Every structure is written in structure tokens, then in C-alpha cells.
Image: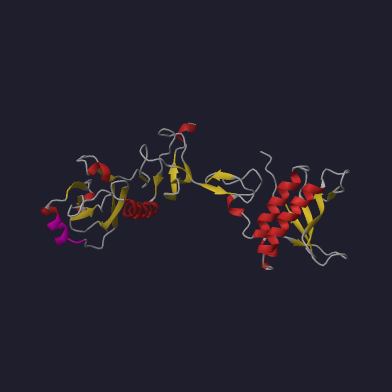
């Protein structure tokens, strides 16, 4: 397969307005740099809910909305009226724009398609009269409405979104400003959702779940600046947390000022990160963060923090 045709599983969003949503897409298929995602039905339902909330908040003349109409394969034909809410410039007494969606449920298995028309009095009457019936297989019809253009009389402002051969729905491709959703690593780096391994060695699914775990990652970053070979550190929690030893494998790295790679400022920086984390921590965080208790004659609370393994590829 040509690399330009490869599909990936990832998540997308539009700034902090829409998403993130699971999807499948071809990262090479771009519109002015933006992505063209394909969504499973569950993601379409959530996308629909989010667009409707935005339209209610900001006005229907500024937001496209997605609608999911559900029915049965053996149901009678139905008509559904989709009403647009008030626009920002809605005048008192002015009717909201609306469309009628005609769904031939029984005939859809033979290739018939749902259709969209104006919400005429006749269509409104049919919508009130006919209800979805039947117990057959569940079918859905997905509708995309661009209210700002519908209000201008466009005959292409509303359309039925057809699933592709994998049952996925392309919504907003070559039209909306979709971009990759990201995840933030405890080390502070951001990665695209499908990039599951951070350069620090942690993965998206192995992120620390407690403040001490995050602190351990940050301490590793600090200590590896002067000593990239560092793999772990011993931390004494008897009084105020402090790094008392740094190791590369089983060998201790010289932490004496002026003789080893570390200086007072670097070790003090690491100690401060630990102290700030301890202020937020609870006793259970030590175990949850993977800190290993080390028996020691001089300390009643000596722990080893193992740093993430840095990828070699």
C-alpha cells in the first residue's frame, strides 16, 4: 500500500469547541492543512450532541449541526422535521428555518435513500401522523445542516451523510478545520493522539496517576540533563524529600559538588519538585507511583524512583 493511502486510528477536534472524537483518517488527505476524519456511529452521536449545544449557545446561523435519526428496517416511511433555533439576528415573530427529512425505512435495504425538502405544511402534517414502528434491524440516517446557508436559500445546505464501505461517516472533511487531538505526557511534552509513545519513554497508557509519579518523571528529566545515563534515584523522605543518590544501572553516579556531573542547583531543583509533590500527596501515592521501598539502616523512608526507559529507535 502506498504510504499516502494509509489510514490510521486517532482522535480529532476543532480547537476546544468540538471533540475530541475517535476516528479513522488518512493523514495525507488534507484540505488547506486540515484533516478529513471518518467517524463510527457512536462518535457521530456525540458530535451531534456537541453541535446542537453549540448552536443553542451561539445561534444556529453560526453553527452547522449534525442529526442522527434512528429507525427500523421494517418501519413504515416517516417524515422528520428538524427545526433550527433562533439566530443571533432573530427578529420577534420570525419563524425558525426548518427542513423535512423523508425516510423510506423498508425500501432502504433495496437501495432507496432518505431525502430532504422544505418543511411545508404537508410535511409537518406527515411528521405528526407517522411514527417509527417495527422490530427489524436498526437503521440510522445522518443529516448535516448548514443553517447559515439554508437561511440564504441554498439547495445544498442540508444533505444526508452516507456511510462508506466500512460503515464510517465522513463529516466535515474538506470543509471543517479538523486537527489532531493531543495528549500531554507527565514530562510536559504534547503528542498527537495516535503517537502513543513519548520521547521520554512513557506511553499514553502508562502515565503516572498520582503527583508523586509525575514528580518522579520530572526528577528524571532534571537529573538526565547533566547525566543522560541516569536510570534511577534514591530519595530520602525521613524529613523533607531529597535526592541522596543517583544511579546508572547498579552503579552510583558521583553527586559531590565539583567532582561529579551534578551541581547544587540541579540537585536542589530536583528536591524542590519532590517537595511540592509531597505537599499534594497521600500515603497511597507512593505505591501507586511505583516508588520502591529500600531497607536502610540510616533512613526509615528510603525509596527508589526508576526513570522511564528512553526509546533507542
Relative horizontal placement of residue 173, taking residue 271 as reference (left or right): left
> Which residue appears at 41% of the width and 32% of the height?
32
Place of residue 249 in the rendered image (x, y in percent of width and height, measured from the top left): 80, 49
Which range of residues does the magenta coloring cover? 124-131
Quarter where residue 33 is shown: top left
Asked if the magenta segment contains residue 127, the reply would be yes
Residue nearest the viewer, comparing 140 with 177 = 177
Place of residue 39 in the rendered image (x, y in percent of width and height, measured from the top left): 39, 47
Q: Quadrant of the C terminus?
A: top right
Q: Is residue 132 above or below residue 199?
A: below
Q: Is residue 163 above or below residue 241?
A: above
Relative horizontal placement of residue 65, taking residue 112 as reference (left or right): right
Relative horizontal placement of residue 115, taking residue 191 as reference (left or right): left
> Which residue appears at 45% of the width and 38% of the height?
26
Q: Residue furthest left?
A: 122
Place of residue 40 in the rendered image (x, y in percent of width and height, measured from the top left): 39, 50
Amino acid at each position: 500500500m502506498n504510504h499516502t493511502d494509509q489510514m490510521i486510528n486517532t482522535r480529532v477536534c476543532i480547537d476546544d469547541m468540538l471533540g475530541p472524537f475517535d476516528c479513522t483518517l488518512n493523514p495525507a488527505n488534507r484540505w488547506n492543512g486540515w484533516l478529513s476524519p471518518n467517524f463510527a456511529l457512536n462518535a457521530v452521536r456525540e458530535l451531534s450532541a456537541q453541535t446542537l449545544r453549540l448552536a443553542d449557545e451561539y445561534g444556529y446561523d453560526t453553527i452547522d449541526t449534525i442529526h442522527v435519526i434512528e429507525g427500523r428496517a421494517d418501519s413504515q416511511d416517516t417524515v422528520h422535521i428538524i427545526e433550527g433555533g433562533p439566530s443571533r439576528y432573530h427578529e420577534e415573530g420570525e419563524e425558525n428555518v426548518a427542513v423535512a427529512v423523508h425516510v423510506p425505512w423498508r425500501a432502504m435495504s433495496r437501495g432507496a435513500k432518505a431525502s430532504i425538502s422544505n418543511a411545508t405544511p404537508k410535511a409537518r402534517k406527515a411528521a405528526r401522523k407517522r411514527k417509527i414502528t417495527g422490530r427489524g434491524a436498526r437503521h440510522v440516517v445522518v443529516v448535516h445542516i448548514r443553517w447559515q446557508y439554508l437561511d440564504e436559500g441554498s439547495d445544498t445546505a442540508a444533505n444526508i451523510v452516507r456511510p462508506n464501505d466500512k460503515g464510517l461517516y465522513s463529516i466535515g472533511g474538506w470543509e471543517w478545520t479538523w486537527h489532531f487531538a493531543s495528549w500531554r505526557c507527565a514530562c510536559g511534552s504534547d503528542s498527537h493522539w495516535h503517537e502513543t509513545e513519548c520521547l521520554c519513554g512513557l506511553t499514553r497508557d502508562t502515565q503516572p496517576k498520582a503527583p508523586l509519579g509525575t514528580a518522579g518523571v520530572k526528577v528524571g528529566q532534571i537529573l538526565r540533563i547533566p547525566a543522560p545515563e541516569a536510570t534511577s534515584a534514591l530519595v530520602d523522605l525521613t524529613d523533607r524529600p531529597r535526592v541522596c543518590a543517583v544511579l546508572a544501572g547498579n552503579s552510583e553516579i558521583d553527586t559531590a559538588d565539583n567532582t561529579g556531573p551534578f551541581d547544587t542547583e540541579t540537585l536542589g531543583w530536583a528536591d524542590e519538585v519532590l517537595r511540592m509533590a509531597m505537599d499534594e500527596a497521600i500515603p497511597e501515592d507512593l505505591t501507586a507511583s511505583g516508588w520502591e521501598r529500600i531497607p536502610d539502616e540510616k533512613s526509615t523512608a528510603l525509596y527508589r524512583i526508576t526513570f522511564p526507559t528512553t526509546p533507542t529507535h
